[in-house]
Image (spheres, coloured by chain):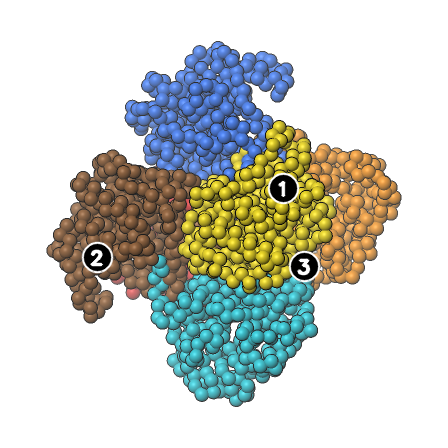
Chain colours: A yellow, B brown, C cyan, D blue, E orange, F red
């Protein structure tokens, strides 16, 4: 049964090492996209995946499709528009954070409508549909496409997950996230997002404003998540990744998972020498979907997702190129980084 | 006295060596633009130059401005819009030509109007204004900007040159080149372009359709150029670069220059191991403007332009990073490529 | 209908630029293999392809499979043995030829037997099977595998092609090519090879020893090919690529195609600035199989194959990453290498 | 009003990554120089700057001038001598410190005299002159040039700053720093240096030899700085950067600033994953001069300088390529290194 | 007097930076081998060294010999077999350990016998012979070669050292380490290895199974080492490197040295930003042999070895390219990583 | 018996590909030096070689020594002075020649005197001594060292060869080549140089000024060489390399060799795609010395030298990294550049 992602494919252009953009004349290109990253994660862990998207009919678009195939993600990608979506990435260090500069105007995905895809074919033998808050943020038409797709997926009986992924800079077409996202979330079974995502995307805030950050994070989150569960009776589970940023190189990383009954938390990882943290959130979503499909308990699914995304921080690029065996070894406690030979 | 260029600044992203685009994950970025390339050529030969343009207010736009400064071109560049103009370049070889893939939708230059610049300040101490057919090709507003600028330049008494530079793929906003370019050419003193440019940009064709290509090229051109001179009484000189493409690596290169009286031709160069031919035409225009400003005769100006642009084919990137001394040495006949030590 | 190739997958490690091996510490890896190269060519031209092979169950083997998928070649690749097949490549120049140093001992393909594959599944919806003389050269078991596969393919009604590809250095397991290849060739419909291949692989030599090389090449070949047709009544067509090596950078390139009636020859290309000639022969075989599947006449098929493989010489690496449109443009005569923009 | 720096321009050649020099055949060149670095810092923060120096009349010297222009530093650089100043840099790690190997014999700056510059022109519209102890260390003539320049700058009413920058290995021409520097320091308003610099450059030592390092650093420094203030009545402020080197990758970084009344200290930064610490001191001086020019209080100036130089440790190369906004964000406390998107 | 090492030479192919193998198409080659690494360490510290081995007679084998010469190790390397020994290395980070993938089947060293070397010539002017447990692990014939060599070395009066270096994955030819190693260890004077090495190579285990790890490590080791001393009366000293792996980037590093009387321990180093830890154990062995030859006391020898191998962690590649002066500076306590200029 | 070279060792820093110097921030370092290049050539062809020189006692000097050892050249290199000799190289193309920018002021070799070497030890088991006109060009002291060495070599009975290698830009210490070189040439057996070298270094010109270049080159040379033979009775043979530079990429290459009786000429090579021509002359000298030592006739020696240096043009860097087998294959006529596999 297939895991399906739908969204924008972009070409990420990275400055090498820790250089500022164009400090020296070199850019390292790699295809990315929140939902593509999730599909690739699921593929790495042995699941069958499809990706729905659009690219221009040129050398870049064709290369994007080759990349999906390389990673065993079946492309349902149509040619549309004239522009490949782009972003430029600087890797930070210490007190200087990484930067992502988007160039996503007039991109291919804005030129497709639901009728451009054969949904029956897409959803055949499929069990899971994943989307993120990035697609509805790009344009009115992509928001409509996203809404159409989640409805269609529910109709077909798939589990639907949405990673809220709120990116303020992307909401430029005249609507706010909280005007658009609730209609999509109404069709979701699994929601992924943190407090800020929930506030901006769904307009739900914590009453409990004095809650001290950190120590009672779980209790704090419980309150907000309960509100979400109240408003969205369709939602079965909500997952939250918990990142503490000590510096650009050093983060603490954990996660929690709530259902209508309880909140469970994952082991916390101290990641002191981050290689690349872009794509970290996507690797959590991909790990979680994989976890739900590969393990029997929520506890295992959450630990798998957290360990998988912990390892992502050691891999350059947006794709979480680690194996099921590497993740489960870390879940079992082997995080000492010894040489394998 | 300043030479001024106005146009679009773009970031050219090249695949390394002779690779196809994204064959391996590396792109070599360098700023370019037909008029920028002309300005840099003039700067290399010791002339004072300014460049009028627009970039987005981000790391890429700022890097573009730094590049102009590095090459001693004074930037009159405003922040506008959100997108840096881009192109992707594959270097061909043998029977496979190089390709240039443009990504110039919604770029900064489309978001400026004449009032965004202080023209009095720009044209102060200036003697020459250069534009190309690329700017009017991009959008209605850039076409208007171009027309405004050539008129203003004439008003201020500058010599105006225009390189027709017809690029079919760029004329996408609903007008054809020949609907737009004549109004601009009416204000020009010096025109640069070949037969195809003249036909598409000005709608002027040769009657003499049977003319055998090659042998009587000069006579053939004379007839067409005379038509241009007839229709545009303002034009004083027309220059044509003559490229024979034997393969992607091997071109023959010469040029001719006509005034209302006669047509002169330059020495012909056999360029057998082209390093980079993108920017070759711009280097001819830059060499010609420099030649008119640095030499007393049209013959010298033309030979200088031809030698300068011949050398461009040995330099990677779009900028003609050769010196006045190197060009004049070639003009004098030293093209043996001996080691200088 | 699928085109199927079977053979060894190897990791080719190239010294950069024109360096000698390990002159500086950098090697550029890329997957290759005569039959894989053929499959990728067919895929580039829009045909459906499968590849049958074996790799070790490690990071290299998995990367090889990803590469096949990237190029839209369906992998029927099993894990076997412990070693990835390797070769090291130095790119020559001028009078110094390129070198290929093989390291193909104890490789994965030697550890598979026919029973490791599901042949019914492999040959389902397939129309063409391609093999080369490299597979039988590697070991007794790979020779047996090759023989089994061609028999099976014939049984299933596929067209079988074999590129003789004689490589003296590879025949190390105690048998000579001419002891092994005839049994395989007995099951082939299309044979690819030159005079030397035919002599070493099939033991067939020209009587006509004084024939002057070059001028009457076609007549000369006709005589030998007639002998092959006599001995192997199964063979319907024989194709010969004709390379004249003037220097490591400069080759002339053409081909001929014979059936039992006539010999036709392709246009000849002068390739003066070779980017990479390794994989040139495979690109001819891939172009020919594609040509037979995409065109109606032998003439077109041969011209397509010759133009495709001409273009391969302008692409770095072993894979012929050119498009159907690029090849047909060259077939139609556009080999001037002009910039496409 | 311009900030002016004067000094040696050098080409720094770095081994890549953490390699030892020439471990692999690659060197990464970048122009540098204590005073150039200061000028570039000031330019980055929006101040107008000029640089006075000398280079050889060759490709390297011209490239150095282009680099200054790129960074918006107006070059008052004359051609003199035959050698570009050089240094070779190895980046250390852990317990192994970085190394800088100088090659500054017979360099261009040694071949200029005050009469080679038009000082009236240089100091027009200028408010600040900066020099370091490196220039007087190079040769008798550069020491004389430095003394001439500070006198001239005072004469013209500029604020003069000097970063003592004591480098034992550079003082090779027969004089010790303390024989030369006092005459220069007599004309300075702002002095930058640490205890060791003050001891070697000015011959002033602390009586208070038992002072425990670290805890009462400020009190300890106060005593020495008071001595400096006593001997040099011209000095108005003294700034000291406080670096604690835990390893090559991990430093603590703070600073203090004294006037004749009080000593203030900056926030302390823990920099655990240093990207490049060469140029760190210069970025402090550049930040301080900028701070004095952009803020109203010494407190703000010092915090700006410390934050700016903290960020330098995350940027490869000698130039502090960070923006005013990035520095002030860190001053306000945002040092968590979160991704900016 | 020469230090002699004997063993396998391999070409290590590293993925760049922290990439997964073949993530991007680049591999960084460097010659390595446990005993070669030891010889190079000794050479770096000023000792005379020879290396006994075998390579194929091709470009790779010749390059390996050039590398030995470059590092002042005299090669006694014969041409044999057809395959260069290989390994592929991925550099880990954080919780993800580095990986080493061996490709050592049918390698040159398996094709030599003792009679291929002139042992009298090899052992002339030699004082020390070093071998590791890797050579006997490769094949029956290399185990026999190793045994022959240690016997011969003892016969000639050399000190013999053996680094047990147990690598489970290498013992594939049908024998276990503990069936082979004891016969070799019977001829050794100095043994290097940790508890796991001793258990697997010699079959000796600690009774004292409850010993808490860490705190009483020395006492714990004393017990095991005493058993080794009992069984092997020839052994005079046993050295153990003590690595605590906190993450792939962060290790603690120390060592102990036992003779029949006492156990001494070295200073412990905290290495937080490991550049390359592959070759760390070899650098300890090389440092120890050098220490015994360059210092008068075991304490100094051990501290030298520990400091030398600590510094190795800051150098990319397998060779410990640090100097005697750098090591002794660290021994004396200078591990602050300050810039040297 | 050893071939000995003496001279300056320099670090050549090349811009990558065909870039202008510092066009992008990368320099490729490699050690070089006319006489080192000769020694490495001889080593490649199996001869024993030593090199006499001087380097600074730093990381660069030590790396230079490692490079000699790597190439099997025994270093008699002392530490002296403070500066490594440097040059910067741009690779030309087409009409633009390559450039070499020297930075050889105050280099190590200027700080040695004959007494710094043990000449008895150096000349033990030596049969040939080679020097070039570069060493005497650098300074008065290097000229004296060169003269001392050639005298000593003659005294010891060695064959002495000198490659005149006139470089106008290097003669800066107040003497002209023709004031210095004759004294050295008086001790030479074999002279290498062309007409221009002979004129500038020895002051000998052709009377026969109207000789048409090209066709009667041999006759023309005969006349001049006879004059040299007349004035220098010690000289037994004179070799001249004949380069015709058609472009930076395309040279014709041949040579002639005269003794007092006759002049013989070598086969001429057309080299159309030069990879690197710097070091071409040195490779001829190295090939010639090797030829005299490895072959019985002057004809073979000359053909070997010409073929060896022809191949050098296909190898990047200054060292002629080709084998005896490759050279003799070309001598025998195999210059078709076919792939070797």
Subunit of mark 2? B
Rate crowding at label 2 as few (under 14), some (14 to 19) or many (20 or more) other CA atoms within 10 Å: many
Q: Tell us which disc is closer to us: 3 or 1.
A: 1
Image coordinates for residue E110, horizontal then vertical, percent: 70, 61
Residue labelled with disc 3: E104
Report how far apart the C-alphas of labels 3 and 2 lie in the structure. Answer: 70 Å
Report how far apart the C-alphas of labels 3 and 1 lie in the structure. Answer: 62 Å
* Labels 3 and 1 touching (C-beta < 8 A): no
Q: Are marks 3 and 1 on the same chain?
A: no
Q: Tell us which disc is closer to us: 1 or 2.
A: 1
Quarter the N terminus of chain E occupies = top right
Residue labelled with disc 1: A230
Subunit of mark 1? A
| Residue E304 visible at all | no
Position above or below: F326 against B189: below
Give the left or right position of residue E228, taking residue D69 as reference. right
Image coordinates for residue B305, horizontal then vertical, percent: 25, 51
Quadrant housing residue C123: bottom right
Residue beneath the point at 51% across and 77% down: C193
Position above or below: A304 against D33: below
């Amino acid at each position: 049964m297939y895991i399906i992602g739908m969204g924008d494919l972009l070409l990420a252009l990275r400055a090498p090492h820790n250089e500022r953009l164009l400090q020296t004349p070199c850019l390292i290109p790699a295809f990315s996209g929140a939902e593509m990253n999730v599909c690739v994660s699921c593929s790495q862990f042995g699941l069958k995946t499809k990706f729905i998207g659009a690219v221009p009919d040129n050398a870049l678009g064709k290369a994007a499709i080759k990349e999906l195939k390389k990673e065993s993600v079946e492309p349902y990608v149509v040619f549309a528009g004239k522009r490949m979506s782009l972003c430029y990435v600087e890797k930070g260090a210490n007190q200087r954070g990484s930067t992502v500069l988007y160039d996503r105007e007039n991109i291919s995905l804005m030129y497709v409508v639901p009728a451009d895809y054969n949904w029956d074919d897409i959803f055949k033998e499929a069990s899971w549909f994943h989307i993120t808050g990035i697609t509805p943020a790009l344009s009115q038409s992509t928001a409509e496409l996203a809404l159409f797709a989640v409805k269609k997926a529910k109709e077909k009986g798939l589990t639907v997950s949405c990673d809220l992924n709120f990116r303020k800079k992307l909401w430029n077409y005249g609507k706010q996230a909280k005007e658009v996202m609730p209609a999509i979330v109404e069709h979701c079974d699994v929601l992924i997002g943190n407090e800020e995502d929930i506030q901006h995307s769904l307009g739900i805030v914590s009453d409990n404003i004095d809650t001290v950050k950190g120590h009672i994070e779980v209790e704090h989150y419980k309150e907000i998540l309960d509100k979400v569960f109240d408003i969205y009776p369709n939602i079965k589970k909500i997952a939250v990744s918990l990142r503490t940023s000590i510096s650009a190189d050093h983060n603490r990383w954990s996660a929690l998972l709530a259902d209508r009954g309880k909140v469970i938390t994952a082991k916390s990882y101290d990641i002191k020498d981050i290689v690349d943290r872009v794509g970290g959130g996507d690797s959590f979503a991909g790990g979680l979907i994989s976890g739900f499909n590969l393990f029997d308990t929520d506890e295992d699914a959450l630990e798998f997702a957290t360990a998988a995304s912990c390892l992502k921080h050691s891999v350059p690029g947006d794709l979480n190129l680690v194996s099921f065996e590497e993740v489960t070894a870390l879940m079992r406690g082997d995080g000492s980084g010894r040489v394998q030979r």
